[in-house]
Image (tube, grey):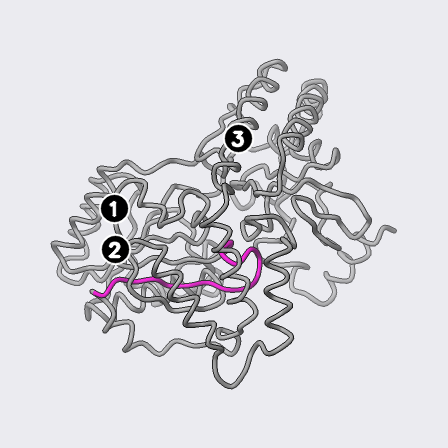
Amino acid sequence: MSKGSDLRRRAGQVMPAGVYGHVSTRLLPDAYPQFMSRAEGAYVWDVDGNRYLDFMCAYGPNLLGYREPSVEAAVAAQLAIGDVMTGPSGIMVELCETLVAMIGHADWAMLCKNGTDATTLAMTVSRAHTGKRKILVAEGSYHGAAPWCTPFPAGVLPEDRAHIIKYIWNDTPSLEAAVREAGDDLAGIIASPIKHDAFVDQMLPDPAYARRARQICDQTGAMLIVDDVRAGFRLARDCSWSLVDVKPDLSAWGKCFANGQPISALLGSDKCREGAASVFATGSFWFGAAAMAAALATLRIVRESDYLEHSIALGEQLRAGLGDAAARHGFAIRQTGPVQMPQILFEGDADFRIGFGWAERMVKRGFYLHPWHNMFLCAAMTPADIDATIAAADAAFGELRRDMADLRPHAALLEILG
């Protein structure tokens, strides 16, 4: 038995359903490794020693490359003198100053640990500031795993979502209808900066929709929240909606701004400073200094390097090469969203059997792509890595074409999709 298989067996005995949450491979092809042993640059190795060019980037936190030397040095230096202490390190003030200086709408920052912390805090601050209850959330959007927003609501009570109103992202009439439903009890509108929902094509924001959301909040006194946890610093060096010239009142950040160290943030404008100050929000590990040091080192690279332009160039190279390779073998693929956050789906593949078949053939060749979730490029990837990916994809498309009659839908995924 391989190390990976043995760990899966043991995990099933001591964890509910084995490994849980977003890193579970239960909804992926059988060839996908569950347990990793190490990571370096753009690559990960599973516990059986297989190496993969990692297009998931730890589901987003890897921005610059795993174990980027200057970030690792900052973490090591801070750990040598103190991490979680009875009070925060002074580095906390420096990090908040840095974030406020970098993000156009921000006048203050609150640091936490996970994206769910930041989005939930944004919702709480909105209610504290306005004294109102209703929060508008786009149908199918992902804002974390708290009861108010988890996509798998086992154990969630109706009361947990009693004041959540759904609308269709990027659809101004739908947003306006939800505002009417909220009446005079509207506390906030939360929006992903791009549509990066699972199982569907990604979509860029219509500037008119984003501007209307801003106008509604200005008219009603509600808070406009941009959930930049996934896309933050992937699309811009400012809040992602700076690309459509719209400033939110609050923005939630996480994933990559410390290049893999555990930290997230809520940034806000002076408009809601008093509401934020009235909220009690804390966690035993929220004030750990090592992750803050990593964030400062990462943000310095964000400001001073061409990491973003490099990732976009690689994404354009990948998108063109995959499109050509797919067409050569008679496949129509949809590549949507920003090129540095690729989403790849197959036409005529409602049950994802083709996408699963192709992704499984890619992972067997050492390229970790995802059949239904958006992916990420990191600054440690090179044009040679992308060329190798395209060559492997060409071979995988060819093998997939030969094996089409043998493809079967993934039972667990069909159960989720209904």
Q: Is residue 312 above or below residue 3?
A: above
Q: Which mark is residue 224?
A: 2
- Gap in angstroms between the C-alphas marked 1 and 2: 10 Å
The residue under label 3 is 345
Q: Position of residue 416 (x, y in %)?
A: 53, 46
Question: Looking at this rendering, what residue extends furthest in the bottom direction?
Answer: 86
Main secondary structure found in the magenta portion: loop
User: What span is in magenta?
Assistant: 255-270
Closer to the camera, 226 or 236?
A: 236
| Residue closest to the eye, 50 or 198 | 50
Badge 3 amino acid = Leu
Residue 291 drawn at (x, y percent): 54, 66
Residue 227, position as x, y percentages in the image: 37, 53
Between marks 3 and 1 in the image, the one whose residue lies nearer the viewer: 1
Task: Of the two numbered discs 1 and 2 on the same chain, state the one appearing first in sequence.
Answer: 2
Mark 3 vs mark 2: give the one in front.
2
Instruction: Return the x and y of residue 154 as percentages of the image width and height.
Output: 49, 61
Question: Compared with residue 106, is residue 281 higher up or lower down, i.e. above or below?
Answer: below
Query: From this viewpoint, which residue is outermost toward the right?
Result: 1
Q: Is residue 162 above or below residue 301?
A: below
Q: Is 297 in front, or is 241?
A: 297
Residue at 36 percent across and 55 percent down: it is 102
Q: Is residue 418 visible?
A: no
